[in-house]
Amino acid sequence: TLDHTNLILTSANTNFGTSGESTNIIFKSGTTAQDTISLFATGTAASGESDLVVKLADANDGTESSQFIIKDSGNVNALSVDSGGDTSITGTLTVTDTTDLNNTLTVDIANDGGNELVVSSGATQVQGTFKTSVSSDAVDELSVTDGAVSVDGTLTVSGATEINDTFAVDVDGDDVL
């Protein structure tokens, strides 16, 4: 059951100004129509460069709780962007080409708040096990587990190396150094 009115724009002219911008569709909502959400297309001089703008309501109290939401056919949120810019995506995000991150990348693989991978200001922090397979037989040649680093193969270090604790060399299970 729909409890709202549908507005359908066909091929009719919706451009009523000289700026090239479309009509600003304004949605008023809330118990006293206190929230305003605007939808319009920007106008530019070059063809094919207009943007679709959704201006969300914001209580200006720092909560940034107004959201733009895309739901799937089961009425489950697939994507949401709040008025502060925080974005949530359910499903797979595929990125092709270069991606710039200008702050912190946090990866919570187990979805338990553990943040298994955090990259911030050039520093990388790993919780749990970090593994990389670089050979064709998929053997982990480098792994980091709870602060312990294991290298299967040759480790080449260039530049100064500082060891602040115990240094041991293990050859066939026997510490030789």
Image (cartoon, rainbow, N blue to C red):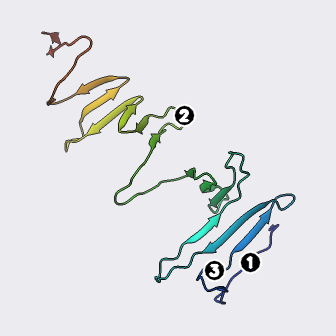
The residue labelled by disc 2 is 113
- For the residue carrying disc 3, how many other residues have a C-alpha within 10 Å: few (<14), some (14-19), or many (20+)? some
Mark 1 vs mark 2: which is more N-terminal? 1
Q: Is residue 57 left or right of residue 47?
A: right
State which mark lies toward you, 3 or 2. Answer: 3
Q: Residue furthest right?
A: 32
Q: Name the quadrant of the C terminus.
A: top left
The residue labelled by disc 3 is 22
In this rendering, the answer to whether 76 lies above or below 121 is: below
Q: Is residue 19 left or right of residue 29?
A: left
Q: How far is mark 1 from mark 2, CA to CA?
A: 41 Å
Residue 172 in the image, given as x and y percentages of width and height:
14, 16
Residue 101 in the image, given as x and y percentages of width and height:
41, 49
**Residue at point 44%, 43% (across, down):** 105
Determine which of the numbered discs, if any, sits on residue 7 in the image: 1
Image quadrant assignment for residue 128: top left
Q: How far is mark 1 from mark 3, CA to CA?
A: 15 Å
**Residue at point 23%, 36% (across, down):** 139
Provide the secondary structure element on which disc 2 rests: loop
